[in-house]
Image (cartoon, grey):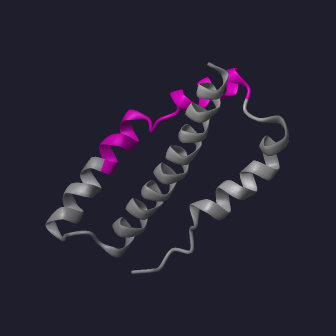
């Protein structure tokens, strides 16, 4: 199985620079939009399937990498949704 070099903090730091959020912050509309993001139903079902196979110890190397990709994206999404909630709380 291959080892991933994904580091959500490094990715999120780069995205902060791309969107220039430290200077401008999240607009309420952007924060609310980020909170609506989620995996499509097909991907959510695939994640469940891969998790079940992982719990049984039956993942192939390819499936492990696929699941790892989902986990990495989920971590990044959770980070951005946390930032969006914080932004909206400051405005309340």
Q: Is residue 16 left or right of residue 82?
A: right
What quarter of the picture does the C terminus occupy? top right
- Counting from the top left corner in percent of width and height, residue 78 is at 50, 45
* Residue visible at 66% across and 64% down in the picture: 10
**Residue 26, horizontal then vertical, whole percent:** 72, 32
Give the quadrant of the N terminus: bottom left
Q: Work out whether residue 24 or residue 92 is closer to the camera in this orientation and state it.
A: 92
> Residue 5 versus residue 43: which sits nearer the camera?
5
Classify 64 as above or below 87. below
Residue 19 lies, in percent from the top left, at 79, 43
Q: Is residue 17 magenta?
A: no
Q: Up-down: is 27 above or below 80?
A: above
Residue 42 falls inside the magenta stretch: yes
Q: Residue at (45%, 39%) from the top-left corner?
A: 39
Give above or below for 49 relative to 64.
above
Which residue is depicted at the point 66% across and 59% down?
11
The span picked out in magenta is: 27-47
Q: Quadrant of residue 60?
A: bottom left
Identify which residue is drawn at 35% across, 65% down: 63
């Amino acid at each position: 199985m291959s080892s991933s070099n994904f580091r959500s903090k490094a990715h999120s730091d780069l995205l902060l620079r791309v969107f220039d959020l430290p200077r401008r912050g999240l607009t309420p509309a952007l924060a609310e939009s980020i909170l609506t993001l989620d995996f499509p139903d097909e991907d959510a079902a695939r994640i469940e399937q891969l998790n079940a196979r992982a719990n049984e110890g039956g993942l192939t190397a390819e499936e492990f990498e696929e699941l790892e990709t989902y986990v990495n994206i989920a971590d990044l999404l959770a980070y951005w949704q946390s930032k969006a909630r914080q932004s909206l709380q400051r405005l309340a």
